Structures are given as structure tokens and as C-alpha cells.
Amino acid sequence: MEGPGAIIMHAMLSLHLDEKSTTAEREKFYVHLKDSGWIQLAKITTTWFSSYKSAALEERIIAEVKQDVSAAARYSGITTYDAVVNIGQSKPSLL
């Protein structure tokens, strides 16, 4: 268990799925992310975040995000997408 004051790292993932992707493919992609522990930001359908223990290194987090996105793409049948991830100590904030 993490002690008081332990730093939790957060990853914010933003996606652009191919415009030719069907609604069913997009839904499968998003279900896979959710099943992998990602939380979709309210009102921002293509932005997600996940949290990691303080011992997680940024390089490891990025590698895990790549694996999650690749797995979601394979599961959904989407072959063309763009993704960007930002790692930090704060959860994303809606404005």
C-alpha cells in the first residue's frame, strides 16, 4: 500500500480514430479501453485517463499506454488512428 504523500502518476490519452471507422468499431475500441482501466472524460469522448502507482516510471507508463491502444485497435478492427499521451502528477481537469 502506498504511504501518505505517495505520488500517483496519471496518463491522459487523446485519440483521433479514422473517419472511416464505423460507430460499432469505435464503440468496441472504447469498451476495450474501459475494460483496460481507462476512464473517459465526461463530455470529451476521445479523451481518457488512467492512474499509476508512484513507482511507475514515465517510460513504463508510455509503453503500457501503447499496448492498451494497440490492443483496442486490434479488438475493434480500427487500423488507422492517432494518439497522444501526457503523463503527470495531476488528474486532467475539465474546464
Image (tube, rainbow, N blue to C red):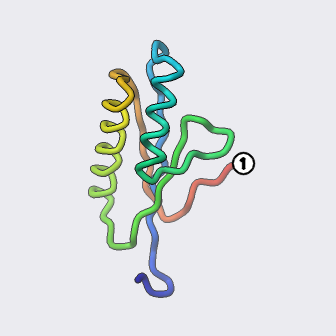
Residue drawn at x 44%, y 33% is 29
Q: Is residue 94 left or right of residue 9?
A: right
Q: Is residue 93 left or right of residue 65?
A: right
Quadrant of the frame with the N terminus: bottom left
Q: Position of residue 27 (x, y in %)?
A: 51, 30
How many residues crowd around disc 1 within 10 Å: few (fewer than 14), some, or many (20 or more)? few
Q: Position of residue 8 (x, y in %)?
A: 46, 70
The residue sitting at the bottom extreme is: 4
- Asked whether 14 or 31 is in front, the reply is 31
Question: Up-down: is 4 above or below 31?
Answer: below
- Asked whether 71 or 12 is in front, the reply is 71
The residue sitting at the top extreme is: 20
Q: Position of residue 25 (x, y in %)?
A: 45, 24
Give the image quarter of residue 87: bottom left
- Residue identifier under label 1: 95
The residue sitting at the right extreme is: 95
SS category of the residue bearing label 1: loop
Question: Up-down: is 19 above or below 43?
Answer: above
Question: Up-down: is 47 above or below 2?
Answer: above
Number of marks drawn: 1
Q: Is residue 93 left or right of residue 32?
A: right
Question: Up-down: is 54 above or below 91?
Answer: below
Residue drawn at x 44%, y 64% is 9
Q: Amino acid at mark 1?
A: Leu
Residue drawn at x 37%, y 36% is 72
Residue drawn at x 39%, y 72% is 54
Q: Position of residue 57 (x, y in %)?
A: 30, 64
